Image (cartoon, grey):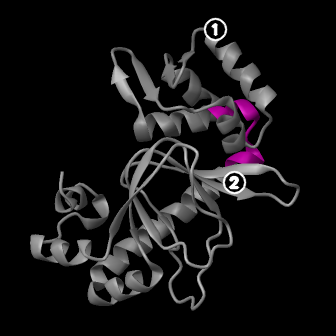
Amino acid sequence: MGKIEYFQQIPLFAGLKTKELERITGYFHEKEYKKGEYIFFEGDEEPGIYIILEGLVKLIKETTDGKTVIVRLATKGDVFGWLVLGENRPSSTYTAQALTNAKVLHISNTDFLRLLTEYPALAVRITCEATKMVLEAYDRLKSLAAEKVEGRIASILLELARKIGKEEGDRVVIKAPITRQDLAEMTGTTVETAIRIMSKWKKEGFINTERNKIEILDMDFLEDLIS
């Protein structure tokens, strides 16, 4: 699949004419990262903007006490990186690491600003995307502060089901190498607690877990935990 076809599938560029896409794609460069490879680190001054074509990327924040929190799990079509406009010296506020083998499109900060000048409508879409990211982060923080750990894990599983899950009969299958460590870092709990809760739910028949796969057998059960 060519770059133009990739861009036509990305909601951020939906509705743009082919000639516009040909011009826009010239600013982007394709990059590939292996599972576990870091894309950029918190504090980097020139992270640029990334759009995921394939794979999963976790956006990580280190707390003051040295703990790791996954603030967002970016999936196909998601935008991440430096999305703050008007800053002369941009700095990423998190670390990005490939959770699976990932293919992304990258644009530098300088070219990004040039692109927004040429296409004001795209600037509006980018701003909306940044707002969505802020709201997701707010919801995640609110969940960490207010919900019990079972509810937090349920919220993450439902989010993963919505983003990358596939319906197979009466179950939703999440095919991704999500570890108990990842679940713990996404929900602000310990690995031991994540293991205990997931094992309990598996034994009770609400979920099933296999290597690189989580099956949700009872969506209503998870939804009831966060309602």
User: In the rendered image, which residue does mark 1 sit on?
Assistant: 204
Q: Position of residue 68 (x, y in %)?
A: 75, 50
CA–CA distance between discs 2 and 1?
29 Å
User: In which quadrant is the C terminus drawn?
Assistant: top right
- Amino acid type for the residue under numbered disc 1: Glu
Side of 82 where 126 appears, left or right: left
Question: Magenta residues?
Answer: 143-153
> Sequence-wise, which precedes: disc 2 or disc 1?
2
- Amino acid type for the residue under numbered disc 2: Leu
Residue 227: in sight, yes or no?
no
Badge 2 local density, few (<14 within 10 Å), some, or many (20+)? Answer: some
Side of 97 where 161 appears, left or right: left
Displayed quadrant of residue 221: top right
Residue 11: in sight, yes or no?
yes
Magenta-colored stretch includes residue 149: yes
User: In the rendered image, which residue does mark 2 sit on?
Assistant: 141
Kind of element beneath mark 2:
helix
Q: Position of residue 64 (x, y in %)?
A: 85, 61
